[in-house]
Amino acid sequence: MRALVVYCHPRPDSFNAAVRDLVQRKLHAAGAEVRVADLYASGFQPVLTGPEWQGYLDCPKNTACVAQEVDDVRWCDTLIFVYPTWWYGLPAILKGWLDRVLLPNVAFHMPDAQNRTIRPGLRHISRLGIFTTCGASWLMTQIVGAPGKRTLSRGVGLLCKPGKRTAFAAHYLMDSSTPESRARHLARVARQMDKLIGQRVPVPLPEPTTGAVAAE
């Protein structure tokens, strides 16, 4: 198993960091090779520039500015996102990662003379995990439509291998979270990771006091 964990949160002591660490422990215990793309820590630039947009369809030159990120995506067979949900969607830096890294001839193939629509390019990815925290309640998130989750689970998910394994866990009402609610969520993440990996991988859970501040 080769896992790429795309992580984004501006605070190194956030609760999302505890989730990320648990995800990594599960992967390492299962014998996986792991790469972590920490977008804030690496200073990832999320803006698709004018020149990048102009060369968007010029393959393979379109990958020059994000060569390492593209290599990570092509290398992995397991793709996991850990992030806070802001305004029901993805943080700008994570949306920018999608814009700049999941390019034509990387994540999908553009229409051509034989094909009228785009075709998937991530068929090598057989596991997709999504772990997030939300300030809103579950009900309000459903009313709005959970656009962040849908972008990853459907937009990215449809480009991956058919029949892929999936995992999802969200801690809602993060602003009023408690050590108990965070502990329950970490246990839920652990179960979802076992589902994603395909076997129970025992690891100790981190202390739920980590990230006592709200993720938002």
Image (tube, helix red, strand yellow):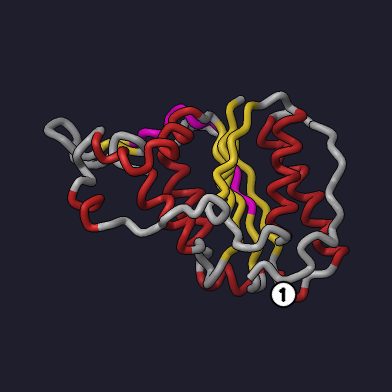
Residue 128 shows in this picture: no
Crowd class of label 1 (few under 14; some 14 to 19; many from 20; radius 10 Å):
some
Q: Residue at x 76, y 75 (%)?
A: 176
Q: Which residue is mark 1?
A: 175
Picture coordinates of residue 72, whole percent (x, y): 48, 34
Residue 5 vs 53, above or below: the answer is above
Picture coordinates of residue 201, whole percent (x, y): 80, 31
Q: How many marks?
A: 1
Is residue 16 highlighted in magenta? no
Describe residue 110's horizontal placement relative to residue 28 as left or right. left
Q: Looking at the image, which is closer to me, 148 or 141?
A: 148
Q: Which residues are magenta?
A: 120-131
Q: Residue at x 64, y 49 (%)?
A: 168
Picture coordinates of residue 36, whole percent (x, y): 59, 41
Picture coordinates of residue 62, whole percent (x, y): 26, 40
The amino acid sitting under disc 1 is: Asp
Describe residue 176's horizontal placement relative to residue 111 as left or right. right
| Quarter of the view holding residue 202 | top right
Describe residue 115's horizontal placement relative to residue 208 as left or right. left
The residue most toward the left is 113
Describe residue 156's horizontal placement relative to residue 47 as left or right. right
Badge 1 marks a residue whose secondary structure is helix
Q: Residue at x 86, y 54 (%)?
A: 207
Residue 101 shows in this picture: yes
| Quarter of the view holding residue 166 | top right
Q: Which quadrant of the figure contains the N terminus?
A: top right
Q: Looking at the image, which is closer to me, 174 or 20?
A: 20
Q: Which quadrant of the figure contains the C terminus?
A: bottom right
Q: Residue at x 58, y 64 (%)?
A: 85
Residue 86 vs 120, above or below: the answer is below
